[in-house]
Image (cartoon, helix red, strand yellow):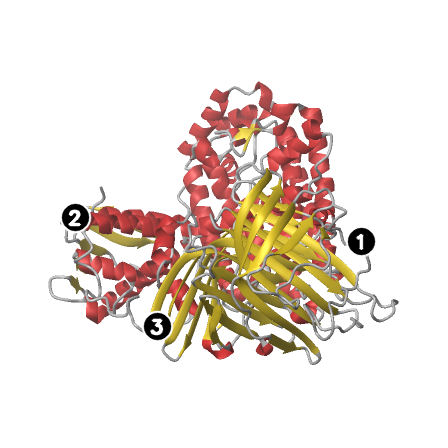
Amino acid sequence: MLDSAGVLITTIDALTIRAPAIVAAAAKQLGSIKLQLFFGDRSEAELFADNSSLIVRRDPSDESYRVQVHFDDRSLMLLFDSAEKPSAEALEKSLDMRGSREDLLATWRCFSLLSQRASGLRSVQAIWSAYRDQVGDAAWRPDADGGDTQTEEMPRWPALAWLNDRYPAAQELLSGNDPVLVPARSLWNGRDAGSWQAAPDVFDNDLMATLDRCKDRVVDEILRLLPHKQPKRDLYDLMRDYVVREGKGLRPTLVIATCVALGGRMEDGVRAAAALEMFHNGFLVHDDIADESTHRRGKPTLHMEHGIGLAVNAGDAMHLFAVDMTLSNLETLGLSRTLGIIHEILFMCRETVEGQAIELGWIHRNFVPRRDADYARMSTKKTGWYTCISPCRIGAAAAGVTDPEQLDKFNEAFRLIGIAFQIQDDVLNLVGETEVYGKEALGDLLEGKRTVMMIHLFRNTTPEIVERMREINSFPRIDKPFALAEEMLAAMEGAGSIDYASKLAQKLAYQGVDRFEKDLAFIPENPAKAVLRQVANYVTTRNL
Amino acid sequence: MASFSYRGGISAEPLGLGPAGPFPRAPLVDPIDRRWLHYAFLSRDGRRAMVANSAWLGPAEDEPPGTERFTTILLLHDREGGWSSSQFNADTARPPWSAFALPHAHGVPGELKIAASDNNPSVALNLKRTGRPCTSQCAFFAGDQHLRWQSEPGIAATGTWNDDGGKSQVDLIGYHERVRGRWSWPALGEWVFGFANDMSGDPENPPEWAGVFTFIRPSADPGEATASFMLWNKGRMRRHFPRRNVSFAVRGELERNDVTLTPPLAGLLGVAPMAGVPKRLAITATQGDDWVVLDFNADAAARVVIPSETSFHAFSVHEVVGDCILSGSVGGEKFSVTTRGIVEFSGGADAG
């Protein structure tokens, strides 16, 4: 059973992963203001911003609060519902806020942002619904006499309002499986006609749900386009099994969101995203063989499960079908957009193999570069293009944008975000849990991957330790005991390399978000652009 | 099968003197001249749904005027077994049953037999009118194109049903419609059609309440949209809520796994994907003191892919089944019916 402080903590935790851009915006409103919160059930909490994150803790401890807020259950519920104006909520013994006028307004803006978004998330609704059941609902209803309810004799509402506000919307909300409360769309209101096909296919309500939705749609299309024929056991089943493995869905989401943000339809981006995923999967299969990795996406790598020969062949086939899926855009998008997509994919593949060559060359020669810039160059080539930059450009091409100047506007923002994301991924490999992360713990150290942490360690430690690390790196992965990886991890911790990498990732992420707002101002504000913004902010609020 | 297969000429035979129906005796002269007879039924236990369409299409470019093509498709849906579909070459009794073929005695059963070429799926039904049709409706668009239709809910049907689950006897109630006109699929744009019958009550009598709705949105000028909601009570059309008095809205999306591509051959032709089918459809209508709300919640759909004569993209008709609430107030009489309905979400030929 949660108390009020617990509900708030759970809500902000959920928003941090599902709506990072909103948390970042709320944190920006709050700035340096520190809040002390008192609730009707006598629980207490403190709330403050840490860069783009919101930190909420129980039992305030210091005295540096600039705003104090007293909620009872009624005002807390009304705030969550955004049901009343602040003046109507601020009743005696219900809601009381103390602080300077500017601070109070900033606090209210922060609360409004959070409550607007939280009320659109089914998972958060469920938390608050349970809390309401717990505290009883009579106390908080905004209008006890029901007012404008279904008992009305002569309804004048349009179908849109019926779906959004009336029976059985509430039932649907609580019983449905959809994690996002999708707003209804009007087809006809007596004057204006809309298309039933024109679904705003991507919403920024819940980033996790959007990532899942885009990934599922693209996986579905890949499975549809793969042939149902022999040899199944040694080829097509391997490919199908690999494609449906857990993944974040970042690339499909970027392709589709960019396509929709620039005026295309979700379906326009699906096959291009499918092609991209197939290229990516092919690279991963081969990459895992080259790196001698044992796990990928929470399961054994393909070559560990089926042997190197079949895995190499399946990887080749993935690339072949990626070409096929690229060409399948001809029948849905026409020649010019498909050529644009082909151009982008070719460039992406070239950058990726060049980046891979640089890193494998470093490992082969047991070389560790001294500068972060060398890492940034390699990382941009190896993963930056295919993880972040190219998906956006491909999505834009699917929407019919082929002007190089416009396409280039995606580059810098998503280059920075991509590097930040990669560094965070590398940090997670060292400090994250295998179940959550999907790859084997310390796998990067076992394979001798040149990360920012390793580069920092080599730059900031004694010559003796450098020599020892070089020796560890010289072991082939298959002969490298796990203890050596742990020894290198300890050295990195000793040299502050992991903290350094985390901070560098944060810095790059902020720069990326900044460039996102500046460079992509030419895209009009719409739900799909908001999804891109959520992805950009994902790296700034991600818990490492 | 030979007893009712349609192996003769593809023109409908004259049924007698005068406009005996179901269509005027006028040849189809343009490649986009069309007419069809539509059947949609739901079993009274809510478990099954049947949709069938017999269509005539005008001559191809190099054929003489009056040459007609005839196709029939049959779709059967079982809540447990899913959809079974024929190709467009289903055999049907000739001429196909129609409430609009005269003379047509009221309450007297007529025969409707439709079967896929391998007899799976197939139906052999006795159809009986229990009510009256609406007045003829017409939508004009794209300058010189039009679609004219007339609908009749409350058609009762009993007979044999054959799908993957085997043969069984069924008791259905549904909807029949005749459509004719001249239109190309890209110009037509898209439509939302559908109906709901009150399935409770005495099967010998017309449904207490029934609704039929239409929304056509031509692609070139959405301002030419047509919309209406027609409400039947005890077999007679009681209210026609016209264009300005109705509103349509949708929400959510049916799981793609719940949408089946038909006819079976369409899966081999690399048909481009379509937008997701809406999960919920709400229609509200008001006129004077009368009002009605239809709230439909989809649970399965079949996407029927129809080749388009004038565009690269196919036209798709999604036959969607689901639960439905029909409630309202007419002349001071309030009603609320929980039932099943069938909705068509169509479009796609104007894509890209």
Residue in front for this viewpoint, A483 or A234: A234
- Report the mark closest to the observer, 2 or 1: 1
A233 or A403, which is in the foreground? A233
- Crowd class of label 2 (few under 14; some 14 to 19; many from 20; radius 10 Å): some
* Secondary structure under the numbered disc 1 in the rendered image: loop
Q: In the rendered image, which quarter contains the N terminus of chain A?
A: top left
**Contact between labelled residues 2 and 3, with CB atoms less than 8 Å apart:** no
Q: Amino acid under label 1?
A: Arg
Can residue A52 be seen? no
Q: Which mark is residue B311?
A: none
Whether label 3 touches label 1, CB < 8 Å? no
Q: Residues within 10 Å of mark 3 (few under 14, many from 20)?
A: many
Q: Secondary structure at mark 3?
A: loop
Q: Residue A128's spot in the image, x, y percent? A: 28, 51
Q: Are marks 2 and 1 on the same chain?
A: no
Of badges 3 and 1, the one in the foreground is: 1
According to the picture, the residue beneath numbered tag 2 turns out to be A43
Tell me which amino acid carries mark 2. Ser
Q: From mark 3 to mark 1, how far is it between C-alphas?
A: 54 Å
Residue that numbered label 1 is attached to: B7
Q: Which residue is mark 3?
A: A155
Q: Is residue A59 left or right of residue B59?
A: left
* Vertical relation: A140 (above or below) A476: below
Q: Nearer the viewer, mark 3 or mark 2?
A: 3
- The residue sitting at 84% across, 71% down in the picture is B65
Q: Amino acid at mark 3?
A: Pro
Q: What is the CA distance from the residue labelled 2 to the residue labelled 1?
A: 81 Å
Give the chain of mark 2.
A
Alpha-carbon distance for marks 3 and 2?
Answer: 43 Å
Q: Residue at x 68, y 71 (%)?
A: B187
